[in-house]
Amino acid sequence: MLSREFYLNPDTVTAARALLGKLIVVPDDQGRRVSGMIVETEAYLGTTDRAAHSFGGRRTPRNEATYGIGGQAYVFFIYGMYFQFNVVVGPAEQPHVVLIRAVEPVEGIEIMRERRGFLSEPGAIATGSRSDKNLTSGPGKLCIALNITRELNGSDLLGDRIWLEDQRSFTDTEIAVGTRIGIDYAGEDTEKPWRFWVKGNDFVSRK
């Protein structure tokens, strides 16, 4: 399990890159591990970032978790359909978060397929099944697969409901950097290079 110190990094952009390769673990109701390795992230820098929910100091019941100490989950509902999972980073009252855009399934893959309504295909990931490539390749998809809902909003990532672990590391040459997705409303902040993803990974939402 990652330490509190990891989440207290005041440099959110660096934290977003450092989260690549970490494992998100969300046990199911029978205690079985269901997990995915993070392969795509986006940084959101709080009150000064036009793309952030807390831009300009906005503080509401919906985004209150972003003002907590680093190492909490921020889960919100979007488009009336999907949840999205963010990791709160930095000190308390600095509402910075990292959106987890995609993960590569690691444990509990059959459970993920069932939750996503996929047919069981033994060995599908190893053989490059098109359906499995779509299993967790987006922020809404991964929340369904891992069963991340609003009930986990504000959860301590050092607790027993959802947590992150070390899985593997990537070098600079293995990581791509680009602009964030779906924030056309954010003016000049639209062009900030605050999205990171693992090059060549099948589960990245958009190359």
Image (cartoon, rainbow, N blue to C red):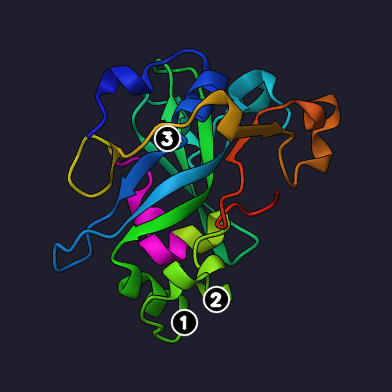
Q: Quadrant of residue 92?
A: top left
Q: Are marks 3 and 2 in contact (CB under 8 Å)?
A: no
The label on residue 57 is none
Q: Is residue 83 magenta?
A: no
Residue density around tag 1, few if under 14, some if 14–19, many if 20 or more, within 10 Å: some
Residue under the point 73% across and 28% down: 50
Judging by the rendered image, the residue that carries numbered circle 1 is 118
Residue under the point 27% across and 36% down: 156
The label on residue 131 is 2
Q: Are marks 2 and 1 in contact (CB under 8 Å)?
A: yes
Residue under the point 61% across and 42% down: 199
Q: Is residue 108 visible?
A: yes
Which quadrant of the rendered structure holds the N terminus?
top left
In magenta, the rendered stretch is 143-155
Find the distance from the CA under tag 2 to the CA under tag 1. 7 Å
Measuring from the top left, give residue 31's x and y in whole percent: 14, 62
Depth check: give the residue in front, 55 or 187: 187
Measuring from the top left, give residue 95's x and y in whole percent: 51, 24
Q: Amino acid at mark 3?
A: Ala
Q: Amino acid at mark 1?
A: Phe
In the rendered view, tell whether residue 179 sits above or below residue 10.
below
Residue under the point 43% across and 30% down: 88
Find the distance from the CA under tag 3 to the CA under tag 2. 34 Å
Judged from the image, the secondary structure of the residue bearing numbered disc 1 is loop
Judged from the image, the secondary structure of the residue bearing numbered disc 3 is helix
Q: Amino acid at mark 2?
A: Ser
| Outermost left residue | 31
In the rendered view, tell whether residue 186 sits above or below residue 77.
above
Query: Which callout, 3 or 2, points at the residue further toward the start of the chain?
Result: 3
